[in-house]
Image: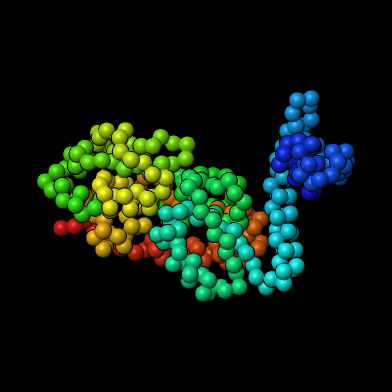
Amino acid sequence: MRAFEAVGQNLSFTGGASALSVSQSAMSRHVGGLEELLGKQLFVRDASRLSLTAAGEELLPVVSKCLDRLEQTMNAIRDDEVTGRSLRLHVPPSLLQQLFLPMLRDFHIEHPDLRLDVSSAHVTGLPSTDFDMAIVYDRPNVDDRITDLLWMVRVAPLCSPATAARAQGKSLEAFLKSEELLHLKLDGEPRDLLWTAYLRQSQMTVATHGGLAFDTTIAVAQYAMAANGVFLGDIDMFAQEIADGRLVMPYDAVIEDGYGYYLKLHADDLADPAISMLRSWLISRFGALRQAPSPRVPG
């Protein structure tokens, strides 16, 4: 299995042999033995390249996950930490800072024996790193993972009190035309995607090509509060800032833009009691947050 994983990750018998510090012929024998056992070819071999077959593509992520979990368990036994358990959880950075850190504190108090290794990356959709569970910011999509909606994003133009004061007597369209629009960059998408979609849904015509762009929502919000500009903010994520007056929603112009926060995990991992418990806990906590009252427009 380790030989198959090394060759599959490198798509090379030479690279796999180097990764495991064994001979190329030994790697070939191990992989050939596995193919004989399964009665299926795992690689397509030709003169110029090596590629996985459909069976190989299905087997590789399962083998990698099982070997990783086996290594973690063996390390825990070696280090006398068998009572502890670590789950790898990915959380988008703005959600982590705005809402999830207090949840993490509560979870740790309620379940002190279950350890969480929390990672965060500036990504839309699934991260490239290995994980047991991931909260992702994305549009609804279908893949081979179990997907639970935690939080449907509701956005509205938000800004500082000084910027909001300039909205007096103006329509929303006129106000946006007179202010700098701040952007949240999404991986692989145009920098003004969110503003373009918002304006189209609201039937307004405003130029969106200018303005600063940031890779996290929290960075956009902090800039708007400290400097200038208007950004599309999740009114639930920034409810406290709005209540405190640090951010203002000058118009009642809230929409659902199609994005949300989703919890994703592999179906076979639900057999793990720790993962199943954490999944239920997260769904319950985010469900309670969604029931909170919405921020109000000033005045």
Q: Residue 156: x and y, percent?
A: 29, 49
Specify the color scheme.
rainbow
Q: Which one is nearer the viewer's eye here, 181 or 147?
A: 181
On screen, residue 177 above or below 82 = above
Instruction: Count how many numbered circles sit on residues in the image.
Output: 0
Asked whether residue 55 appears in the rendered view, the answer is: no
* Residue that lies at the very extreme toward the left in this rendered image: 169
Q: Residue 9: x and y, percent?
A: 71, 41
Q: Quadrant of residue 236?
A: bottom left
> Residue 186 vs residue 29: left or right?
left
> Residue 248 vs residue 12: left or right?
left
Seen at 67% across and 73% down, the residue is 83
Quarter occupied by the C terminus: bottom left
On screen, residue 64 above or below 296 = above
On screen, residue 20 above or below 205 = below
Asked whether residue 163 appears in the rendered view, the answer is: yes
On screen, residue 104 above or below 21 = below
Seen at 38% across and 53% down, the residue is 218
Q: Quadrant of residue 245?
A: bottom left
Q: Residue 246: x and y, percent?
A: 26, 58
Seen at 26% across and 63% down, the residue is 244
Seen at 49% across and 66% down, the residue is 104
> Residue 35 vs residue 267: left or right?
right
Q: Residue 201: x and y, percent?
A: 31, 39
* Residue that lies at the very extreme toward the top in this rendered image: 47
